[in-house]
Amino acid sequence: MAQEQEPIEEAIEKIAKECEEANASKWCIVRIIKELNSMETKEPEKMRLRALEVLRELDPKAANIFASFQRMTVRNSNLEITAFDRGNIIKSLLKETKITRGVSEKIGKEVEEKINGLQISYLTTALIRELVNVKLLEYGHETIRNEYARVGLPVFEVEQKISRQPYSNRAILTEYNLLKVIPKELSDLHFSSDIFIANIGDFSTKPSAFTVKAEKRAGMKKTIFECVKQKNKLQKFFSWGINIAEANIAIASLIEKSQAEEAADFFAGALACASTKKPLGNIGLNLFVPENTEFELDNETLVVLANKFLEKTVAGNSGMKPVFLVDTKYKIGLVNKKLCKKAGFLNCKKNYFQAFNGIPAKNGILSFIALNLLKQAVPNSPEEFLEKTVFLAEKAKQLAELKKSELAKRAYLKNAGIEIEKMQPVLGLHSLLQACRHSLQSSSRKKNIDLCCKTIEKTRKALGEEWIIAELENPTAIKRFEAQNRKLKLETKSDEQKMLLKLGLQKSIFFRAFAKNKSGFNRLMDENVSWIGFKP
């Protein structure tokens, strides 16, 4: 029941109708219409505010009633907060049923009056639909009520289902988590696009990301088969696509260099047969042998096999993104020059990480929450900006702890060998640099660096060292944040990664940097950038 943009005349007519229902006199309504027609802006929200101002001058009692109409907001199915508009009830009834316009308008008005009388803390489209259905029954429209009825499950039944095994009805689980699990003060921050909670439908049932390590078995095909089998087995327990670590290490210990293409073909075929519609996972390809590897292998075979995996993964339909793990900048010379732009490179010179869906981590990702920093910066001072950012970071921590406690109740995760307590939460920061610029209203490089560093420092202190702080790359979160920011006349600039690197912030926040060529790659390795890609 999301509100749609409407013609100016219709918007003014609707406001006039609301004034009439607030018991304003005809004389007041004429004055308001004249005032609204003279306004330069024709945004409905601003026109309603002006109508309220005029009413307060002419008829304070009617103004109070009119104001109560504006306070009603709806949490809609797009996870947004919009103003309540009974016109949406009328539109949905006419669209979904064969009821007459006259009856739908009568029901819309009576439902609005009922909501006003109940003084509900917040509305959802599901609750509005329930109230409409009651009215349909009151007027004897049982058949139409059955057409308009919502199909779902009671909270108790959802609780029973998720206690036994993963449950995959995203719409039902999203509603359950918002009604039962996530407190309103926290979910409201998501609805208002101050924060973003990834995979709300999985909040109480699944961690975000996991990596399966290729383990050496009795033969190449057995090793590949068991690795893909384990990946498929665990996929149902996680929100994001399962990643594979050290894909070429175990296999390189079992084959000759001449068998590399055969092994890569078999692995790519096995992955393609098992591919799902889940988001892409990463397939980790080592160009060095990590410490504590239990078996001997030939480095040349390791590299040849990694390149064959790159070739087959790029050419095939495996649903996997190749990522090379490198420990020195010189290893770039070992990678297929024609295909290296199709891969990512994880810098393991100082720390040995694995690739988790585009984020370097060690033991899996518990949750992913993002902050819309640009919204916090306008029109606040640097002090207020920092205060609001820390407040949101604390709420993100509260959400991660809540998710962890919910997942600890899921016996099926423990039975599958999934160790929740070892996984890390991730915080994504959207438009850190631009937010600092807006808050400071200054082009001073030093001031911007200082505020960026303070923001990360205070955020880190609020969260704790176990958190991964990263530049936001989640496309769903970015789309939500930028849609909200456009309403505030804020546009996100595209130079964020480049500027983060220039300001030397790669030690404080994870982000991906891109090289144009081999020398650029070497510079990024020297600067200890964690994840490097080549510009296509």
Image: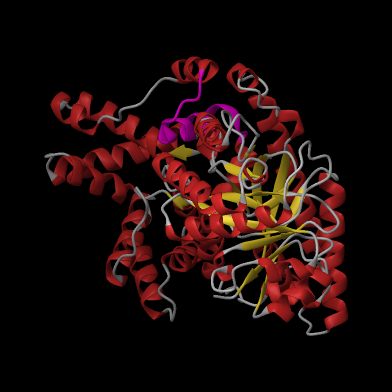
Q: How many marks?
A: 0
Q: Quadrant of residue 343?
A: bottom right
Decide if residue 288 is on the left or right side of residue 269.
Answer: right
Q: Is residue 412 magenta?
A: no
Q: Quadrant of the C terminus?
A: bottom right
* Type of colouring: secondary structure
Q: Quadrant of residue 116?
A: top left
Of 229 and 16, the residue lying toward us: 229
Residue 4: where, in percent of width, then height? Answer: 34, 59
Decide if residue 303 is on the left or right side of residue 394.
Answer: left
Decide if residue 177 is on the left or right side of residue 515.
Answer: left
Residue 112: where, in percent of width, then height? Answer: 36, 41
Predominant SS along the magenta part: helix
Q: Which residues are magenta?
A: 165-183
Residue 177: where, in percent of width, then height? Answer: 54, 31
Q: Is residue 171 magenta?
A: yes
Residue 525 vs 475, above or below: the answer is below
Residue 99: where, in percent of width, then height? Answer: 13, 39
Q: Quadrant of residue 308?
A: bottom right
Can residue 376 be seen in the rendering of this structure? yes
Q: Residue at x 50, y 25 (%)?
A: 166
Can residue 61 be seen in the rendering of this structure? no
Q: Residue at x 56, y 61 (%)?
A: 478
